[in-house]
Amino acid sequence: ITQADLTAENHLMIGGVDTLALAKKYQTPLYVYDTGEIRSEIKAFKQVFEANQVDYQISYASKAFSTVAMYQVIAQEGIHCDVVSGGELYTAKQAGFPMSRVSFHGNNKSEAELTMALDNGVGCIIVDNFYELKLLSKLAAARAQQTTIMLRVAPGISAHTHEYISTGQADSKFGFDLNSGQADLAVKQAQAAPFLDLVGIHCHIGSQIFELNGFKMIVDKLVTLFARWQRELNFYPRIINVGGGFGVKYTSADQPLLPTEFVDAIIKETVAQTQAQQVPMLEIWIEPGRSLVATAGMTLYTIGSSKEIPGIRKYLAVDGGMGDNIRPALYHAKYEAVLAKDPTLPSEEVVSIAGKYCESGDMLIWDQQLPATKPGDVLAVLDTGAYGYSMASNYNRNPRPAVVFCEDGHSQVVVQRETYTDLTRLDVPLITKTKTGH
Ligand code: LLP
């Protein structure tokens, strides 16, 4: 937090808007985003590619944060996005997102979802397995629709990260295995499918990655593979899609590379490897999710009860928790919080931030320094922009918070707060037969 993020009274600001005013106007818990920061993250990625003068595509992994307004921002910035379900595809469509700039991912897309993708002219389908390859080939042929695909491969490289979010190791549910000849067979089948146009190869090695090595290894491995495919299968992939996973800084202890440093290294490695292995230079695709939205978002909560266990810990409870941010409970993810009324106040005590859900694991932050607080104070948990709202639930029948976008001093609701009526909207009461006794 810098002085630029504070009002004259030292209130925390986001997108030029006072967070205390936001909490008052829209209530808490509340997801708030600095839309301008999302745009700058996209521009930063673009600049690295431009500086290296290579062909590229940035595809926002919308699972990180998917709403109509977000797809509008992505469309405005002129990049692609990827979706992983009919629901994300539908939302992108509702936003008027150009379908030709959408890639469709997933390890078990249904026939209905694939048909929806074909109906809408989705730009690229990333085929994950033999079942899907056959199904899609049949669907495309039945309607004589030329369909652009990439194959997802599991490169057998494990990114150094939390095990639940590593997806690139060999023992993974995603993608064609590279080490057992499955990928070769998939290429042959795709080549033989008259209505499938295989343009590239995709892989994704994990999420919240802090090290360059994994990315360099996949580039080396894929380009080596492409060289062999040229010789043996007469297959010349045009695109290398290295997925997402660029780590972001959640706490002061985190020291990740800049997302752009990852990309710069990926580009340079691709140039070097294609030259060394005499493979035509490839178009490089990346799929950043977290790195476009994590630090652009924060969650505002109101502090309520507290509990002090002498000599052990002080719990401070807020009006949200695991329903709006499951990441601490699910991945032991770490966050930092500040007092919205003045983030510069000196810290006075160590507190743990608890949610309001009926579960001991519903903790947002363990043991962090905070100034003295009182009930009613607004707490801002920082950098919650990725996989917060998108993984939110109605656990304990708590309505999900609203989402507000802030830019240039203006705020706008982009997802309304759920109401109690919304919670029972799909419930169907049991049809009770009048009991007549015995
Ligand atoms: N591409 C593919 C094929 C992916 O599976 C993912 C994320 C991404 C791109 C974007 O990765 P990112 O840049 O956001 O790291 N819910 C977890 C993260 C799951 C990521 C799944 N795949 C979390 O909250 O940390």
Image: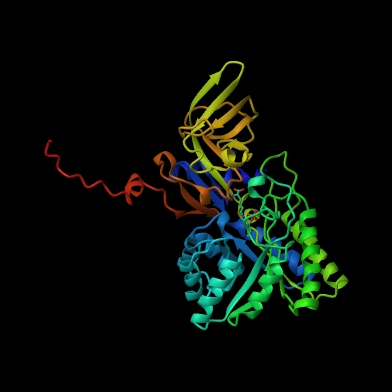
* Closer to us: 352 or 411: 352
> Which image quadrant: the N terminus?
top right
**Residue at left offset 58%, top offset 29%:** 352
> Which image quadrant: the C terminus?
top left
**Residue at left offset 32%, top offset 47%:** 424
**Rendered view: 209 above or below 232:** above
* Closer to us: 177 or 396: 177
Q: In this view, does 343 lie to the left or right of 30?
A: right
Asked whether the viewer can see residue 139, the reply is: yes
**Rendered view: 245 above or below 325:** below
**Rendered view: 265 above or below 275:** above
Q: Where is residue 47 in the image (x, y as percent from the top left)?
A: 73, 65
* Closer to us: 71 or 208: 208
**Rendered view: 276 above or below 144:** above
Q: Residue furthest right?
A: 276
Q: Is residue 136 left or right of residue 164?
A: left
Asked whether the viewer can see residue 76, the reply is: no
**Residue at left offset 62%, top offset 68%:** 79
Q: Position of residue 306 (x, y in %)?
A: 50, 25
Q: Where is residue 69 in the image (x, y as percent from the top left)?
A: 50, 60
